[in-house]
């Protein structure tokens, strides 16, 4: 397969080979949704090509990560309020200005480990317990950001509920910290790891910044405010995108979309390198992707667009470095995917699109049944689109839409998939599946 990067290296490729033997971060070794794999299945069902199916406690949309034969998943166990004993009448009466009751009394944020060969649940460890947690969007979960596995350190972020460093060997919490930002509908941004730093965008309704923590201690190393936002509606100031580490134009860059802006930072210091004003977009969740000397970014709600930005700029490059835009059928949740000289994406309502990366010209669009949050995967010459309704549509990349198969599992597919050996890992709201030809 032709390489995607001309004069540019995606940071994951500097630290890990593009293989299916390890999957340590969101969207795989490159952070781009690619895996070098062979003999991946194109068809499956609950009865066919399921190597194992393991129940996962709680409910969450984070993706699996794994290394050394062990799979790691974060999850959230919710305790409904009605399961907590009623408080005495006199205690209730003290809360004269009480708002409507939260449907949850508490949520316990946990990490589980699973044996990759057998699917056996090996451990289930509590990281944090939050009483009276803030309400979240019905499409979100309390454990949506994917953890990052760095050696024996699992870095777990749960938005305003807490951030944790976890030792996978000792199975114990090393440190905890709180990063304040009112996210309104729950967390979504997955942290990036650069040398000894864990870098996290915190784009809330009340404040917006990017922060780097020492990954071993949780101590703050640098913190940079986002560019000034316009408009008085705070709800339009939030964002949930996962940043992308790249090496481009002779420097390391952290490309981090936010409401109204896309910003590139020096990951070592937090210094702003360049910025692009993308409009009034907000609540953008897709991770950027790179091709050649361009980074492609989705702008979020209001008027979703996909914009391609040259990576060699300095300062405000809004008027000078935007190479092209796509303004039709752009997703607000699933990330795009680059395969050779084309970019593929599926919007939230199930319209898939293929466009040229050279100029953004659309080659085809196709409505696929279902609704979509999960980001697509490219591996073994196939693209996998996973719907909320549990369907996976498999297509071949190319200038024309070429559908291979449509497969269905029980439950929702909200988490993005992973590749392990010659099989897929698919997480529903209740189970983790290993999909592959049975030995």
Image: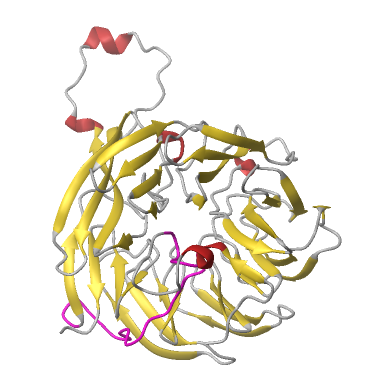
Q: Is residue 396 left or right of residue 117?
A: right
Q: Is residue 82 left or right of residue 286?
A: left
Q: Is residue 307 among what the camera can see?
A: yes
Q: Identify the residue shown where x is 31% and y is 61%.
A: 66
Task: Point out the stretch of residues depicted in magenta.
Answer: 25-48
Q: Nearer the viewer, residue 100 or 407?
A: 407
Q: Identify the residue shown where x is 50% and y is 45%.
A: 196
Q: Nearer the viewer, residue 362 or 317?
A: 317
In percent of width and height, residue 75 lies at 29, 48
Please check the rendered image and state whether residue 117 is part of the magenta-colored stretch, yes or no.
Answer: no
**Tell me, what colour scheme is on the image?**
secondary structure
In percent of width and height, residue 250 lies at 72, 62
Q: From what the image shows, is residue 227 above or below residue 311?
A: above
In percent of width and height, residue 100 lies at 38, 27
Residue 64: quadrant of the picture:
bottom left
In percent of width and height, residue 282 lies at 63, 50
Quadrant of the image for the C terminus? bottom left
Please check the rendered image and state whether residue 26 is part of the magenta-colored stretch, yes or no.
Answer: yes
Q: From what the image shows, is residue 266 above or below residue 372?
A: above
Q: Nearer the viewer, residue 156 or 57?
A: 156
């Amino acid at each position: 397969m032709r390489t995607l990067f001309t004069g540019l290296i995606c940071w994951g490729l500097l630290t890990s080979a593009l293989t299916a033997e390890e999957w340590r971060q969101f969207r795989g070794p490159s952070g781009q949704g690619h895996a070098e794999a062979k003999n991946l299945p194109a068809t499956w069902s609950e009865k066919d090509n399921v190597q194992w199916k393991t129940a996962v406690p709680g409910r969450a949309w984070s993706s699996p990560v794994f290394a050394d034969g062990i799979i790691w998943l974060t999850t959230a166990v919710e305790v409904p309020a009605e399961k907590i004993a009623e408080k005495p009448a006199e205690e209730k009466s003290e809360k004269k200005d009480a708002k409507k009751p939260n449907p949850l009394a508490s949520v316990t944020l946990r990490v589980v480990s699973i044996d990759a060969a057998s699917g056996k649940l090996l451990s289930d460890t509590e990281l944090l317990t939050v009483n009276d947690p803030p309400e979240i969007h019905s499409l979100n979960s309390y454990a949506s950001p994917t953890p990052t596995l760095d050696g024996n350190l699992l870095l777990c972020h749960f938005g305003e509920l807490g951030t944790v460093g976890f030792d996978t060997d000792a199975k114990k919490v090393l440190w905890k910290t709180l990063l304040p930002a009112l996210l309104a509908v729950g967390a979504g941004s997955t942290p990036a790891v650069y040398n000894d730093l864990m870098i996290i965008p915190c784009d809330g309704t009340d404040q917006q910044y990017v922060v780097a923590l020492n990954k071993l201690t949780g101590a703050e190393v640098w913190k940079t405010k986002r560019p000034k936002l316009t408009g008085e509606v705070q709800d339009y100031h939030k964002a949930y995108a996962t940043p992308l580490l790249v090496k481009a134009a002779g420097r390391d860059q952290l490309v981090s979309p936010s409401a109204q802006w896309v910003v590139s930072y020096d990951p070592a210091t937090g210094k702003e390198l360049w910025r692009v004003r993308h409009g009034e977009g907000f609540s953008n969740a897709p991770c950027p992707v790179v091709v050649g000397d361009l980074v492609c970014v989705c702008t979020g709600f209001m008027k979703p667009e996909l914009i391609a930005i040259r990576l060699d700029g300095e300062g405000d490059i809004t008027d000078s470095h935007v190479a092209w835009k796509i303004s039709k059928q752009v997703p607000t949740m699933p990330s795009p995917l680059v395969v050779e000289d084309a970019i593929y994406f599926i919007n939230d309502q199930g319209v898939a699109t293929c466009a040229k990366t050279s100029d953004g010209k659309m080659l085809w669009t196709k409505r696929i049944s279902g609704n979509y949050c999960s980001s697509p995967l490219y591996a073994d010459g196939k693209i996998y689109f996973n719907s909320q309704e549990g369907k996976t549509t498999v297509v071949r990349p190319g200038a024309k839409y070429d559908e291979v198969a449509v497969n269905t599992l029980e439950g929702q597919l909200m988490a993005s998939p992973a590749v392990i050996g010659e099989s897929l890992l698919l997480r529903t709201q209740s189970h983790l599946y290993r999909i592959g030809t049975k030995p």
